[in-house]
Amino acid sequence: MEKSLVEQISESLDLKSMDPRTYSPLGLAYIGDGIYEIVIRTLVISKGNMSVNKYHHASSEYVKAAAQAQLYKEIEDILTEEEMAVYKRGRNAKSVTMAKNATMADYRMATGVEALMGFLYLSGNEQRIIELVKKGFKIGE
């Protein structure tokens, strides 16, 4: 069986094992933000060669809080019980900052999505991340 990205990184850098259940929801959102960004940048760059500014603008449409909140609404019905619990922990976490140009509701939902992405990544389940993004943005339908 092929190793997940987190397993490859951990082994190559000789890192201690990471149990996603032991991390705070904001810790999960921190790593989840990065993983989600990589998935979105991969999606955007696959559309062909363009200026970096155009890549950035296209990516922004997917990574802003409102887009992540919409993604949640599209995937809510297919989340497992465990995934929903992780999402809710992230959504309910008290952050000292808030994104510009976002409602508090959208910002909290986005934090929940990022926590879920972080949890799935640290669990070695990149395929589920891709599945949720694909369904959430109706890619290939």
Image (cartoon, grey):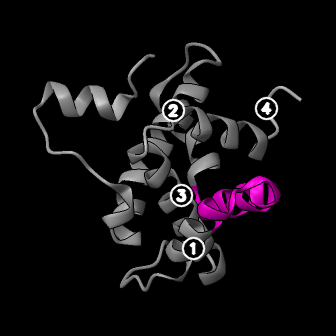
**Please, what secondary structure does the residue beneath circle 4 have?**
loop
Query: Residues under labels 2 and 3: Cα distance?
Result: 18 Å
Q: Position of residue 73 (x, y in %)?
A: 78, 62
**Most extreme residue toward the left, as rendered?**
14
The amino acid at mark 4 is: Ile
Query: Disc 3 or 4, which lies upstream in sequence?
Result: 3
Contact (Cβ within 8 Å) of mark 2 with mark 4 = no
Q: Amino acid at mark 2?
A: Arg
> Circle 2 — which element?
helix
In the image, is residue 48 above or below residue 20? above
Q: Find the distance from the CA under tag 2 to the CA under tag 4.
A: 14 Å
Does residue 60 lie above or below 64 as drawn?
A: above
Q: Give the amino acid type for the residue marked by disc 1 in the picture.
A: Tyr
| Residue carrying label 1 | 107
* Disc 3 target residue: 116
Asked whether disc 4 touches disc 1, contact meaning CB atoms under 8 Å apart, the reply is: no
The residue lying at 57 percent from left, 47 percent from top is 60
Viewer-nearest of discs 1 and 3 = 3
Q: Amino acid at mark 3?
A: Leu
Q: Are marks 3 and 4 in contact (CB under 8 Å)?
A: no
Query: Residue 51: percent from the left, percent from the top?
Result: 50, 23
Residue at 60% of width from left, 28% of height from top?
43
Using the numbered discs, state the Cα–Cα distance from disc 1 to disc 2 in whole angstroms: 20 Å
Tell me: residue 42, above or below residue 40: above
Q: Tell me the quadrant of the picture where the N terminus can be found.
A: top left
Q: Which of the two labelled residues, at mark 2 and mark 4, occupies the earlier sequence position?
A: 2
Residue where numbered disc 2 is placed: 41
- For mark 2, does the 10 Å Cα neighbourhood hold few (<14), some (14 to 19), or many (20 or more) residues? some
Gap in angstroms between the C-alphas marked 3 and 4: 20 Å
Q: Which residues are magenta?
A: 64-84
Q: Residues within 10 Å of mark 1 (few under 14, many from 20)?
A: many
